Amino acid sequence: MTDAEHQKLMLAQGVGLDYLRRILLAPVYDVAVETDLTPLTKLSTRLNNQIYLKREDQQPVHSFKLRGAYNKLVNLSEEECIQGVIAASAGNHAQGLALAAHKLGIKATIVMPITTPDIKVDNVRRFGAEVRLIGKSFNEAQLASIEYAKAEQKTIIHPFDDIDVIAGQGTVAKELLQQQPNCDVVFIPVGGGGLLAGMAVYLKQLQPNIKVIGVEAEDSACLKAALDAGKPVDLDHVGLFADGVAVKRIGEHTFDLIKQYCDDVITISSDEMCASIKDIFEQTRVIAEPSGALALAGLQKYCQTSVGNESLVAILSGANMNFHSLRYISERCELGEKKEAVLAVTIPEEKGSFRRFCHALAGRVITEFNYRYVKNAYQNSQANIFVGVRLSGEADERTRLSQLLSKENYQVTDFTDNELAKLHVRYMIGGQSSTSLQERIFRFQFPEYPGALEKFLDTLGEHWNITLFHYRNHGAAFGQVLAGFEVKNDDQLAFFSHLQDLGYEWQEETNNKAYQAFLTQ
């Protein structure tokens, strides 16, 4: 080792020891609580590892951010406390800082974008902070907070790139080692890096054999970008689904610590986060926010290639979920679990094609079926359907399914990883029918069970041409189908007689204004 390398090592050790001291002395429990380490028994059995969840959702603001904010405030000078503090945030940092300031009697101002949901604005005000709604984005709010800080001589409280904030977040690791000193791997979510840096610097100095893995969202992977570049860099674009980690640039202080003390970084898709939100709910009845479930998603990805029989801990960093996000999460969680395939399939435009296609799936459950008849002079013998199929979760089952359908002479395109198809196209299948089409529209309801849709199609028979079909399996007790049929005037008596004989509950919607506005001319 050269003298320069030795000097660098000694300096790094000195920095690490200073952080260790700060973490041990951080008085966060004046306002924060020691959170549980919850064993996830069902997931442990499924993944062949001992899996635990560190429950930062149990904090008074349902997020770990309270720890760092409070530790920063108690280290301010008397003059800084008198002048007050300010921060830009639309989420957990805002609530953590507001409560910490209220506890210490410090005036806090939070600058939030005007797009911030009312529930978050109300929560911050409930803790006694002043809220200023400025700008349409976080960046605009942040610039405004800097200007206010200069004009009003307020201290800016950074959400992650601050020594005292990092030390406050590191107290999560202190609790973890007391609760589970023999864990093998710890998975920590990454936004700006405050939690990862604080926990890693503590864990690695006291238990260097523990592997520390950062987990970040694919669409806001600023740590991975910084590691590739060798320094913090700006991302061109940041996704907002996991808004708690939607950070454009990793912190300078946090990056220096992460480089030294973090072993690896895993990136996770939105679908995988949704799957982990579901797993957390099923095990704890807690609804984690997307960034809160990020670490568990990383843990599950790690288990796909690990040898098993390890003690694994994931940090549930927050549970401030926007209620309206639940619809999206429910829709996407099975894709994240690898339990649904989304396909475009070309089938013959003829009576009985739907039923024969269902038989070709060899017993697999259809979760979604979208089709609209389009009269095309150039290709009227083929129909394109958008279909979801339930899978068992095996790694190669999507490939085998596509191969099975190809052998049955179906043209198949796999859209399971196509974000445009999953987010938009699946809801836009169809269009207006031909004016010459004598179409009647009906809603059907039937008991939902494996094979129910196939039985419905078998009962429906092949007497009438199906011109529209939409079905989505939501796990409810009853399945819902919207179907259109070409029924000529001479056939109406026979058609309605057949409907009566089916035994399914049905209702005609041909005169429904929504159908008339969007699905027919």
Image (tube, rainbow, N blue to C red):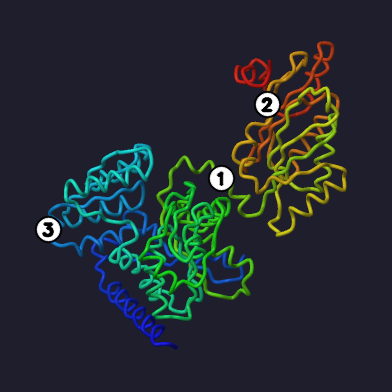
Q: Nearer the viewer, mark 3 or mark 1?
A: 3
Q: Which residue is mark 1?
A: 330
The circle drawn on residue 81 is none
Question: How many residues crowd around disc 2 within 10 Å: few (fewer than 14), some, or many (20 or more)?
Answer: some
Label 2 amino acid? Arg
Residue 16 % position (x, y)? 34, 77
Q: Nearer the viewer, mark 1 or mark 2?
A: 1
Residue 71 % position (x, y)? 26, 64
Between discs 3 and 1, the one toward the N terminus: 3
User: Where 158 sits versus 468, above or below?
Assistant: below
Q: Nearer the viewer, residue 41 or 191?
A: 191
Whether label 3 touches label 2, CB < 8 Å? no
C-alpha span from label 1 to label 2: 23 Å
SS at mark 1 in the image: helix
Does the image show residue 53? Answer: no
Q: Residue at x 81, y 22 (%)?
A: 498
Q: Nearer the viewer, mark 3 or mark 2?
A: 3
Residue 303 located left or right of residue 128: right
Question: Hey, which residue is sitting farthest top in the picture?
Answer: 489
Residue 157 % position (x, y)? 27, 56
Q: Nearer the viewer, residue 238 or 94?
A: 238
User: Where 265 sits versus 520, above or below?
Assistant: below
Residue 504 located left or right of residue 232: right
Q: Residue at x 26, y 51 (%)?
A: 98
Within the image, what quadrant is residue 422 found in?
top right
Between discs 3 and 2, the one toward the N terminus: 3
Label 1 amino acid? Ser
Q: Which residue is mark 2?
A: 443
Question: How many residues crowd around disc 3 within 10 Å: few (fewer than 14), some, or many (20 or more)?
Answer: few
Label 3 amino acid? Glu
Residue 139 located left or right of residue 514: left
The circle drawn on residue 79 is 3
